[in-house]
Amino acid sequence: MHKGVRNMMFTFSKKNYRRGTAALAGAALGAVLAICPEGTPAAEASILNRPYKSDAKSGVEALDWIETRDRNIRKNMETKEQQRLRKDVADMKKALRHDEQRDAAAEASGNAAPQPEQTDGTFGSVSKSKRKNEQPPIAFEGDDVFYDQKTGNVYAKGSVKITRVDGKRVITELAEGNLKEQNVEIADAGQVVNIAPGEAKTDLTGYRVVYNYGRKTGSMENARGKIQSMYITGKRIEFFPDQVVIYNGTVSGCSAKHPDYHMTARRVEIWQDTMVMHSVGYWLGGVQLGWERRVTRDLTKEEKDPYYPEVGYSSEEGYYIADDFSWNFAKNARAYTTLKYSTREHWQNIYGLNYSAGGHSFTLEHGKYEDGNDKFLEKKPTFKYRYSHRIGKSPFTISLGYERGKWKQRARSNSKAKGKDISSMHTEYSVTLTPDAIRFGKKLRMTNSFSYSIIKESYNKSTDKGFGYSSSFLYTPDNDFVIYTGYTHTQRNRESSLFNFDTENYGDTLKWGLSWRVTPKDRFAVGFSKDVKGGHMDKVDYYWFHNFHCLELIFNYRVDHYDNDSKYKLKLQFAPW
């Protein structure tokens, strides 16, 4: 029996440790650390994420990726215990390399220490060729550790910390188990941390942890913590080799103890690439906003859960609330809608059906649309086809587009209407060639795009066709400061187009601006656009982004020199979306 070990650390890759102690660490660690099963998703995908997209037209939309990046950083930020584990694992690996180098040098000089008799379970006591199925090196810390080789019983007490060199750790005050039966139990609180490559990042704290590391099955009660980017709670969590099941649990993208928003579920089943939730409630604070019987999420894709809307105020629309909903009703096919209500424009809904496969996308839509200039257009309905494909091994991607539908715009949104609404059968063909970005070192890159389009309108029997080109430079001296400049040429501008919707004011436009993060929670961006031929200023956009932990405020003030007016918009989005 080994007992009375106090404030000691055993690293089980050295060659002079006994089998019993190595097995003790292997049992305790393999038992509890394996609650992040092999089937748990390893990708950094999240079910609570969607890319940020601004409605700017001054070129500042070229910086949308910054907001998406920052949200993903906040979403995937490691917990303090995960950061501490990462440092400790690095120290363990460094110590192991030192030991291996020392042993190699001793063997080369003929002074190697005598090796113990080979066994089937001790790290370091057998050749590397026989270690394939054994546990990685382990460090075991505790005030008191007791092990009975005869019965297989193990007992550890006081600041127990079991760390495996591949990035897994168990923290508790009291642990016991049996090596022969291959199980371990933690009656009181236990914390499980995992940063192992290829597995889900986990930091869970719970009670009455039971695990059999031979069968890779177990359970934990009254658990709370983080799995990947999801903050979860569960009355009971069960672990299996290929899945995790959470009973009476909650899931949220908000890390607060009482999150601003969350989902509740009677049962949550998590596989490698799928999460299924049963009897799902959607909550905003203490108010339930919706309910679904069953929800399935593809964890390999970025999806956003419904019922958590965007709210705000616009000088053009007044107060508004908006959200997106999507339903996959067949393979590669989905129905979706965007619902929006404002106090001035009232309902602005979009309904659509989409089928996408092999780079092809077919869409049928109907609704009321708004562009970045607060101009509105109705499509009643419209059909769209898109195809995108990289050309062989070349650096070019080709995109084809077609759209045909009935478009309608109210007179107040179009100066060409002459007091009457405009209704036209709109037909558009387009082809775009986009080369890969050209990088000049690590901080500067250039993007280009070439296009040709043909637009036909039945209203005035017009045909508008021509080439388009855009080019931009993006300079990122550091993570907090970004500068951009670009040039755009298009034949479809405000003067040539029948509809005043989603068009440039001028045919040739110069755009430039910057983004600057002034504090960890505050970022400012400004964008300018200017008519190249006439030298007239076009638009100036000012943006302020402020993070309120689980809520984000975005304020935009725009000066429109073309229309000689200004407008502003303030919106709130639930972070990290």
Image (cartoon, rainbow, N blue to C red):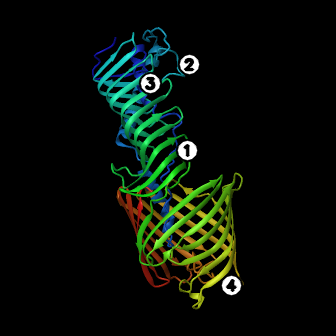
Residue at the farthest bottom position: 418
Q: Could you tell me which secondary element the residue under label 2 belongs to? A: helix
* Vertical relation: 19 (above or below) 423: above
Asked whether the beta carbons under mark 2 and mark 1 sit within 8 Å of each other, the answer is: no
> Looking at the rendering, which quadrant does residue 428 occupy?
bottom right
Q: Could you tell me which secondary element the residue under label 4 belongs to? A: loop
Identify which amino acid the numbered label 4 is placed on: Tyr
> Looking at the rendering, which quadrant does residue 98 occupy?
top left
Which is more foreground, mark 2 or mark 4? 4
Which is more foreground, mark 3 or mark 1? 1
Q: Could you tell me which secondary element the residue under label 3 belongs to? A: loop
Image quadrant where one finds the N terminus: top left
Residue 155, horizontal then vertical, whole percent = 33, 20
Horizontally, residue 462 falls left or right of residue 304, namely right
Of the image marks 2 and 1, the number of the one nearer the N terminus = 2
Using the rendered image of the protein, determine whether residue 503 is visible from the camera's viewpoint. no
Image quadrant where one finds the C terminus: bottom left
Q: Which mark is residue 137?
A: 3
Q: Which residue is mark 1?
A: 274
Of the image marks 2 and 4, the number of the one nearer the N terminus = 2
Of the image marks 4 and 1, the number of the one nearer the N terminus = 1
Q: Could you tell me which secondary element the residue under label 1 belongs to? A: strand
Q: Which residue is mark 4?
A: 459
Which is more foreground, mark 2 or mark 1? 1
Identify which amino acid the numbered label 1 is placed on: Thr
Asked whether the beta carbons under mark 3 and mark 4 sit within 8 Å of each other, the answer is: no
Which is more foreground, mark 4 or mark 1? 1
Q: Which mark is residue 129?
A: 2
